[in-house]
Amino acid sequence: MVLEFLEAERRRRRAAGLQREMRPVDGAQDAFLTVDGRRVLSLCSNNYLGLANHPALAEAAARAARELGIGAGASRLISGSMRIHHDLEDRLGDLKGTERALLFTSGYHANLGTISALVGAGDAVFSDALNHASLIDGCRLSRADIHAYAHCDPGDLESALRGSRARRKLIVTDSIFSMDGDAAPLRDICDLAERHGAMVMVDEAHATGVVGPRGAGLADELGLQSRITVQMGTLGKALGTFGAYVAAADDVIEHLVNHARTLIYTTALPPPVVAAAIAALDLVHAEPERRDRLRRNARRLHDGLARTGYAVAGEADSHILPVMIGDPDETMRLSVALLDRGVFAHGIRPPTVPAGTSRIRATVMATHSDADIDAAVEAFKDAHHRDTEDTEISD
Ligand SMILES: *Cc1c(COP(=O)(O)O)cnc(C)c1O
């Protein structure tokens, strides 16, 4: 039978502890979720500011649905580019400090389309070793030569740049790394780019709405907007909606409108989603206390877990806390033990992270209370003690 490979692959995944399953949750994406009929604390969502089920977003979406409908009808180059898409792009350009912004249907689309529009065969991309899969896939799709440099290592990046004879060069990096929560050395990267005539593309998926005094991201916090060729970010994480943007100078955006196939050949974002994203930007501006709260929660969880003896990597105030375990089976056992104790925190295994670095990726939300964070620490503590009776949790 031709499909025998499915069973072989399944066996291989199971033996390696890498079988994945989707777990149904009931209700909205809130600080608490309902899993198997039980209310559990969510410690795995990218809904950092708690906006995904905010009434202002729901109201904006409902109004847009009534006035503009649900569907965008076609690609924006085909059925007309709706005014509301331009309104959101203007807002994003203002936030990011660029001439223009361009919406994409998702961050995955944005990265594939942008990288493959900027470089091609005969060019070179320089990609951080821990970049998000969508950046890696964008590099592969472009057919440019790919140089993966050691994670957050400007020295390694520089030797790769120095050795390259490519016609065009593009450096791509997450700003806040999705599975590690640490920050890219953007200032060094910009210096190197200028010295070696390279473009820079920064993925602010986990920084948009969260990092910097205005929630504009790491590039804004460091004052580097004018030195970065492309700032990309998503609307589906802290902004609580869906979709993505690329913010850049006018000539870059014009090029993407003409060459980014993931923009040209796909249906535009639904108007209700766009309206909700505008409402989210209003809240990011009007309620900076959500960012402060997020940071405080991050520190509280980081300190609590570190005191409990867990190896928490990354920075102490990062909203992404990688609790390093190493072995995939052990990671998933801890995840199950946490769920038994009322905390929903996913294990992350290869190929999402390198072999030997399986971890619980804990994320905090602005809508968690101090008591919620303390309860999470207690659950980790209890799960640790129970688990170490038969297996060591390695550091
Ligand atoms: C989530 C994510 C993406 C993809 O964004 P989607 O809108 O979910 O497709 C891209 N880059 C990074 C770093 C991400 O974490």
Image (cartoon, rainbow, N blue to C red):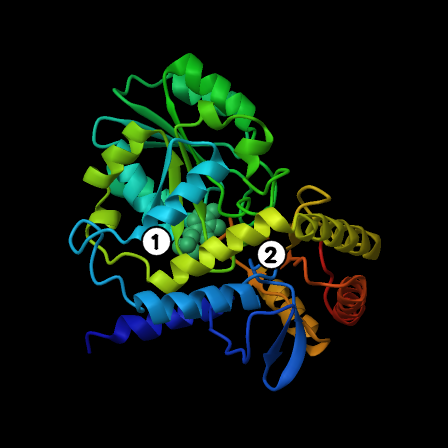
SS of the residue under disc 1: helix
Which numbered disc covers residue 31? none
- Vertical placement of 243 versus 92: above or below? below
What residue lies at 60% left-to-right and 32% top-to-bottom?
A: 221
Residue at mark 1: C-beta within 8 A of ligand 1: no
- Distance (Cα) linking label 1 and label 2: 25 Å
Place of residue 103 in the rendered image (x, y in percent of width and height, measured from the top left): 34, 48
Q: Residue furthest bottom?
A: 37
Residue under label 1, please give it.
Answer: 84
The residue shown at (54%, 51%) is 282
Task: Please identify the quadrant where the N terminus is shown.
Answer: bottom left
Asked if one can make out residue 128 in the rendered structure from this viewpoint, the answer is no
Q: Which of marks 1 and 2 is in front?
A: 1
Q: Which of 112 and 347 is in front in this view?
A: 112
Residue 298, position in %: x, y? 72, 51
Of residues 124 and 211, which is closer to you in this image? 211
- Total count of labels: 2
User: Is 263 placed left or right of 220 in the picture?
Assistant: left
Residue 48 in picture, x, y percent from top left:
60, 56
Q: SS class of the residue under badge 2?
A: loop
Residue type at mark 1?
Answer: Ile
Q: Check contact, mark 1 vs mark 2: CB within 8 A.
A: no
Disc 1 packing (10 Å; few <14; some 14–19; many ≥20): some
- In the visual, does 231 lie left or right of 52? left
Tell me the residue that label 2 is attached to: 48
Residue 251 visible, this angle: yes
Write the residue at 31% across / 30% down. Answer: 250
Residue 279 image position (x, y, % from top left):
50, 57
Compared to residue 153, the image places residue 372 above or below, namely: below
Q: Residue type at mark 2?
A: Tyr
